[in-house]
Structure formats: C-alpha cells, structure tokens
Image: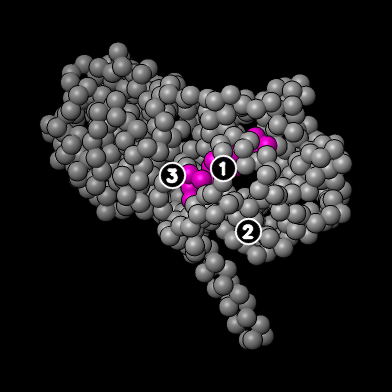
Amino acid sequence: MKRALVAALFFLGILAAAHGDCECDPRPLDVVVVLDSTGSMTGAIDAVKKRIQRLLELLRENAPRVRFGLVTYRDHGDEYLRKGIELSEDFPRVTAFLRTIQANGGGDTPEAVEAGLEMAYSDKDMHWDARAKKIAIVVADAPCHDKDKPLCLELTTKAHTRGIVTFCISVEGTVSFFKELSAAGGGKNVDIQRADDIARHVLALTLDRDESDFKDAFPGEGTANPTPAPRVSRMEKHAEGGFVFQQLHYEGDWDPPHATRRLLRALRERAGVDCAPERRVVRATDESLLKEPFLYITGHGAVKLSDEEAARLKTFLEKGGTILLERCCDSELFDRSARELARRLSGRDLEPVPESHPVYRAGSAIDLLEHTRVHGGHDYVMRRPELLEVKDAHGRPSILYSPSDLGCGWSGLEAGKSCALRERDALRWTVNILLYVLST
C-alpha cells in the first residue's frame, strides 16, 4: 500500500513538472471596473461604455482565464449610491449590465468615489479569487470629496496589500487625484483615449511579462485590412453561411485554455473569412456535430472515446468533415492517442505532408517558422512546421494532425513562454491550416 502511494505521488509529481512551464496554466485574471455614472458624465457616457467594452474584449481575447465584475457609483442623495455585479465568467451578463448604466445625479463636481471603491474591493461583494491576478479599473471624470480623499487612498493602499492593482482612466483630461489613487494601488493613470494601454499593462501583470512586449499586440479600431480569402467551397455549401469552429468535448483533458477568439478574429481580419466569433463545443454524440464540416481536437492526455462516439466521428468523416488534431504542450500521451485515433477512424496511418503541399501557401507564404529549442523556452530555431494528414477518397483532408503545439500561441503576443511555435507564427500557421481545409 505504501509503495503504491509513493508511486502515485511520484507520477503526480511528473505531471506537475510537465505542466510547470506550460503556457496552458497561467494564473487566472479578475478585473473589476468602477464607473462614475453621475450627471457630469452625461455627454461622454455612451463613448465611455464603448471604450470599456473594447477594453474588456481585449482582455478576454488575450487572457486565457478571466472574470469581470462591474461597479457604478454616483453621489450621496442620488437615486443610488452604488450598485454592481460580482465577478463572473458570464461576459454577456456583464456587458448587458454595462449597457444599462446611464449618467445622472451628482450636482457638484466631487463624487462618492469611496463608495464605488468599497464595493469593488470587497470580497463579500465581488468574491475575488485568491489565486488570481486582481485588477480594479476606475473610470471617472471627477475626484472624490476632499474629506473622503484619505479614505479612498487608504482603501486603495489596503487593496494593494491584498494583491489588487488599481488603474485609473480619466475621462476629462488629467485629474491629479486619479494619479495619486493609481500610485497608491500600484497601477497607472491614463486618458480615456489611451484605454488600450490599460489592457497592455494588465496583460503584462497577468502573464508576468514586460509592458513593451505588448506594444503592437492589439490592432487599432477600424484598422482591419482583410485580404481576399481563397475559394471556400465547403462554406458555399452551408445554408447558414459562416464557418463554425467546433471543438470536441471528450472524456479527459480536452480543453486547454487557448485563445480561440483571437484565432477566429485573425481568420476574419487577415483572410476575410466569415466565421462565428466563438467556438462551438460539441460531443461526438451531439446532432449538431454533423451540421458543420470541421472539428478540432486537442488536449494533454489520451482522447478517450466510446465505441458509439468513435462511430459518430467516422460518420462525420464519411460525410466530408475534417478533423484537426493538435498536440498541446508536447504531450506524449496525446501524440500516441492522436495517431491511434487516426487509424481507428480511417484505417490508415497519418503521413507527413510534402514541402509542395498547398497548406504552405493557403494564406501566408510559409516556409520556415520559429520553434523553441526547449519546451517553454525563449531560444528559437527556424524550421518548417510539421503537419500530418490522411486524405479521403476524393483527395480532401480527412484528418490533419499538428504534432507541434498551436493553441498556446494563439494569443498572438510576442513574448513569454512558447510551448512549441513562437506565438506570432503559431497564429499564422493555424490560419493557413484552416484556409486549406476551407478551400477543399
């Protein structure tokens, strides 16, 4: 019994070590926005809410695990002093609450900033995650009442000792109070027009990187310049039109926190492909599986399927679907499982694609990409990306397999740990693979 326990603990230690340098296990991110909704914000509130939504979308797109909360405050004697919703992964709920906020009340210039901060910093109201990187973002155009300034600074300083970093976004130019507040909270103060800078600062803190690494991480608003997409004959057969990125939910570690939204945005903006902004998670037995021609399977361990599930995936392939298997974090278990699954579903072995294969020209012209010499490292070597394939009787891709990690790089950011491909190259290569699938 004792030997069995020691062996089990040793095995768990190996697994923990294997994931220790993995980009798939970042610290979660908790973000609470504290918004001034007094009357002085009337002329700016709609534009400010759009800026806040963009800020949240940027964080949600680039941080693998994120929750948002929202607090709005006015002044003493107004319709309400403060109200909000606690931290949640339910992004539509948060943005729906944001849209309901209207500016009113106030009367004098100072506002009850301390009331918003008390609620935002409260564990009881917000349910902060002790493991998370914790961020509060104050968005306002006026300072607190003079008598409440020491309380605001005290609240923010104490919150900082609990790990909550406070940033401030000034709506009407620079207000010295917000510079002091953000300094007390370990953050920064920026003008509303530079709200994207807050997203960069927050991501730098969350992913333990330097802020300069995020200088070009986000495209400007309205700067998308789509290139013409290749003929997408599979999509022409869709009654609904757009491409749907389906991901398989199977028994096991099926869902590493990859930035799928970022990938789909790149597919839209770089290649002009009409696609749903979110992935669709399906099980092999779901009726909806057969309604789309693409299925993505990834994970760290074995892909466990019942006979019924395997039969359903065979039917998916027989109807002209394509399965993309991706090995996350150099997992040996997944590698063996992926090759066995390909044989089980098609009766054939995966074969490396030749250098002349159209996938290398499906979008970007790709020859050599930067790969890490060591998993999770920063030292890169140039080589051709690998892809294995099984084709159907009509010469179309039935099963594709990337033995190199793709999803850990979909954030598109230029620094930090790379599981296999450097981040920018992982995004480019995956877009090429999807365009190849869609063009067949």
Residue 146 lies left or right of residue 20; in this view the side is left
Give the mark toward the camera: 2 or 3: 3
Circle 3 is placed at which residue position? 413
Q: Which mark is residue 300?
A: 2
Give the Cα separation between the discs numbered 1 and 2: 27 Å
Residue 285 visible somewhere in the drawing: no
Give the mark toward the camera: 1 or 3: 1
- The outermost residue toward the left is 146
Q: Callout 1 environment at 10 Å: few (<14), some (14 to 19), or many (20+)?
A: some
Residue type indicated by callout 2:
His
Give the Cα separation between the discs numbered 1 and 3: 19 Å
- Which quadrant does the C terminus fall into? top right
Residue range corresponding to the magenta coloring: 422-436
Give the Cα separation between the discs numbered 2 and 3: 22 Å
Q: Earlier in the sequence, mark 1 or mark 2?
A: 2
Residue type indicated by callout 1:
Ile
Dominant secondary structure of the residues highlighted in magenta in the image: helix
Residues 210 and 98: in front is 210
Residue 28 visible somewhere in the drawing: yes
Residues 243 and 352: in front is 352
Q: Secondary structure at mark 2?
A: loop
Q: Quadrant of residue 233?
A: top right
Q: Residue at x 67, y 29 (%)?
A: 243
Circle 1 is placed at which residue position? 366
Residues 65 and 115: in front is 65
